[in-house]
Image (spheres, helix red, strand yellow):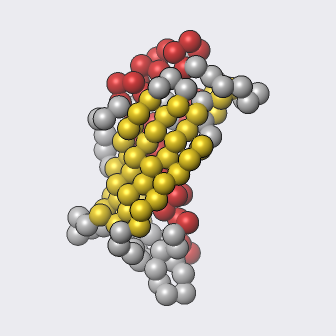
Amino acid sequence: MDKYIHTVQYYETDKMGITHHSNYIRWMEEARCDLLKQVGWPYEKMEELGVISPVTAVECKYKISTTYAEKIAIRAKVEEFKGVKLKVSYTMENEAGKIVFEGKSEHCFLSTDGRPMILSKKFPDLDEVLTNAVGV
């Protein structure tokens, strides 16, 4: 998978000129959306088909601060997929190639009425794509 590149915006920094910690979670979402687009299942397509995928857990490890205008390369990787639950890991690097952040997010799949959805039954092609993406 291609890395997602995010440029730190001025509004994402605090009074000290450092990226506010909450923005890394947003960048995780940007990279996850990009990952799904790369495998042919963008969020727009899933939502049109009645699939939603809320976050159920987040883990963050901040390594090095980032600042305005830095380009951050984000590698999103499917760590685990069990049909109903998806785990994604994220590694963010600055332009010098140093790891600035590592994180994970967990997601489930629901129908728009809030009921759990087993993708292998409802959308076997999405299930197959996510199964094949594990570890790639």
- Residue at 35% across / 30% down in the picture? 133
Q: Image quadrant of residue 108?
A: top right
For the view shown, which residue lies furthest in the bottom direction? 16
Vertical placement of 33 versus 124: above or below? below
Split into 4 quadrants, where in the image is the N terminus?
A: top left
Work out which quarter of the rendered image holds the C terminus and state it. Answer: top left
Q: Residue furthest left?
A: 96
> Where is residue 41 drawn, in percent x and y?
49, 30
Viewer-proximal residue among 62 and 23 = 62
- From the viewer's perspective, is 58 left or right of 77? right
Q: Residue at x 35, y 72 (%)?
A: 64
| Towards the viewer: 34 or 107 | 107
Is residue 2 something one can see in this rendering?
Answer: yes
Residue, x 51% and y 77% (percent of image)? 13
Residue nearest the viewer, comparing 91 with 38: 91
Q: Nearer the viewer, residue 57 or 28?
A: 57
131 versus 99 height, above or below: above
Picture coordinates of residue 39, whole percent (x, y)? 40, 31
The vertical placement of 115 against 3, above or below, is above
Horizontal and vertical percent position of residue 126: 48, 22
User: Residue 114: image x %, image y %?
Assistant: 73, 30
